[in-house]
Image: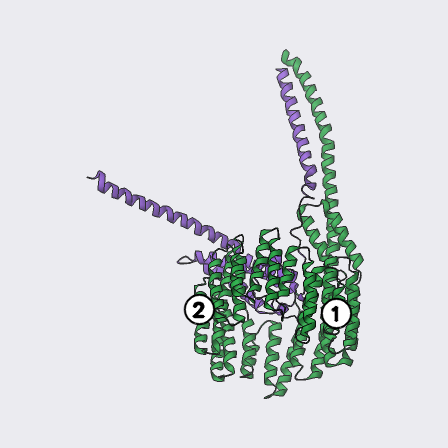
Chain colours: A purple, B green
Amino acid sequence: MADGRMTRALLTTLLVIGLGAAGLAFLMPAAHADSNADTPEGAVLTGNYCLECHLSSDTRVEEALSWGGGVYRQQYIPCDALRVVTEERYHAENLMLKIAQISEDYSGERMGSEEMVQRLDPQRDNMDALTQAEVQSVNGFAGSAKAIRYQAAKVLPDALDKHDETRRRNVIMAIVFGTIFLGFLGVLGYERTLKK
Amino acid sequence: MTKGRVMPASGKMIKVLLLGLVALMLPLAWGCGSDSASQTEGQDATKDIVNTATNLAQKQELSIGRAWAMGQAATAWAAVDPAGARRAVADSIEAAEAAAAGGDEQRSVAADLRAQSSDWTPTDWRGAVALAERIERNASRAWVLRAIAGELAEADPARASSLLATAMEIARENPLPQYRAEDESTVALELASLDPDDALRAAAAIGDQAAKARALREIAQQLSEADSARSASVLEEAISAAREISDPYDRAWALRESALVPGVEASQAGQLLGEAEDAAKQIVDVEPQEYALSDIAVAWSHVDLEQAMAAAGDIGDFDPQARVDALIGIAEARLSASDSEGARTALEEALSANEGVLDVYERARAVNVIVTDMAPVDSQRALDLARDIKDPYLQADALRFLAEAEAAGEPDDAVALAEEIEPAFVRVQALTAIGEKVAGSDQEKAVDIFTKALSEAGDLKDTYPLRLLASAWAPLDPAKALDVAEKVEDDQDRVVALTDVALAMLETDPAKAHVLFEEAYEIAQKIKSDDDPFATATVLLDLAAAWLPVDKAEAADVYAAAFEAAAAVPVEESAG
């Protein structure tokens, strides 16, 4: 009995010590993990003005926002300023398009999507005005696009809820129609086979 | 009995064990505690380093922005009043030189940041590297001085040359090769308008082959109209430099651009594009290779449409967008060459290739571009495509373009099309643009369209379209335009609207026009923007440029105010 208690006490003690040592071992290397393995792919060399690389007489400067391929193509051009402007435009407009599409999917007879659209439209108006104007500086454009994206993102949780609700409704509808269809098949089968 | 004897023994042992445990846990607890304390100290040190570097980066950007804003205002002012602006020009040059100074210290802060961040968490480390690059990018940069020289070149070529010499010295002293090359290249280009021989010497001295090829190519382009023989020989040098570029992507880019310089024979262009294709095929990564081939296909369309379509067909399937880009580019090149059938074929293929693009936004944007390019080829097809766009704003953008394109020939159809636009914000802009186009031939109809636009604008939360409406309406009915301008809420928009109304009122009511100009001037001076510290200077610059044909002296005063506003922007900012 005494040996058993001692064994249990020893085991408990060893377990506590083991957990303590494991916790310490876990804490120690955390700060150094992966620190030298990654590459700085997040780093961007942002120029603030087209004029850094172009003369004021260069007509390409005035066409910064006209079509030059999508955001993926812009990753491989030598113009940092244009790349940043394109990325900011992509992020803001893409977010707003996704929210608008969720709203479109949700709309119909159901209530709720109008309010979401009403909250989003002012940001889409702002983005339209921003993209109609000439880009004066990358910081100016990026700051405005980020502010618009920030405001649009406030509608996002509501949009995601609506998206989930649409999916749930679709699943329920599929189950209901599936059940009706199977019931119909059952009745039809009964009528044509067992009933006879 | 056994129980009574054993209990003290086992209890003693447990006590010893517990004591041992406490003895072990104490140093552990101390270790953990001191670790978190040292972590906190480490975090504080990290924060300090990042704050110092962020402050420096902000200071650099503000110094450069301030020098350029001062330079723009001073040089524009000097064109109107050279004597009055002398001091401002000198101050802006001084500010540009100050912005380029201290590069070694700034780069040492960046180097320190890189060194310190080597053992930070990956996220912090990436942020630190990006910040270090931001500092390095803005250290010892010659572009502001070069740009000021460019603005002064016409009025004061001697001073411009001297500034460019200083800019070249700054550029050559920059130890970072990519920025040195960039500045050397643009200084040489700016020099070309003053002294082509000096410019060619400067370009020839550039060590980086890609920058050298670019400088020589663009100098050849500048010379192509005035001296085609010399342009051809400079282009040959540019092509030689392009062939020396070691990176295949950059080599493909430089060879492709050389093929597009005006005056290049079709056979030579074809040969260069063939070389560019060979270089592109040496690019290891698939995506940049496809985009390089896509750009080359577009370049082919200026030389040979069949070859261009074949080149577009050769682009791989890794990213369908590369082929869509190529086909749209080819269509645009064919439109410029008045080849409607070639453009239509390319656009229909682009539409079909676009179905394979996975990114919903990029796919939708490409459709919008296809619609605008299709309009001059087949307006009904363009309209059908626009009406098929589901998103109201993307559809509005396409319909706006088509309505504006229709305005001159069929204004009623254009108005009907504009009325299909769902968001009122875009609908009002479209109606305004149609009215503006119609105004030249039928003022009465234009006024009807403007009235319709105004009636549609009632529920707008953002009054930006009213600024456009006021400006467009002003030449026909300044009083009505003034009513509209007064409804504009944003100060920057209001300045533009009031200025346009004032300009339109000059003939009929010059006194009122001056009152409106003064009002616009007053609003402009008070403009503040969280996003752009130079907003006041920019708005004043635009106001001065608009008023220049009316009254040089008043415009000079506004330029002076713009200069003062730029100079007053503080460059010492706290990162917080």
Mark 1: which amino acid? Ala
Residue position for label 2:
B383
Give a yes or no on whether discs 1 and 2 share a subunit. Answer: yes
Q: Is residue B574 above or below residue B502?
A: above
Q: Residues within 10 Å of mark 1 (few under 14, many from 20)?
A: many
Read off the chain for label 1. Answer: B
Q: Nearer the viewer, residue A134 or B354?
A: B354
1 or 2: tag closer to the N-terminus: 1
**Which numbered dot is residue B199?**
1
Mark 2: which amino acid? Leu
- Disc 1 on helix, strand or loop? helix
What is the quadrant of the N terminus of chain A in the image?
top right
Q: Does any portion of residue B59 appear in the rendered image? A: no
Read off the chain for label 2. Answer: B
Q: Residue at x 70, y 78 (%)?
A: B558
Q: Nearer the viewer, residue B122 or B260?
A: B260
Marks 1 & 2, CB-CB < 8 Å contact: no
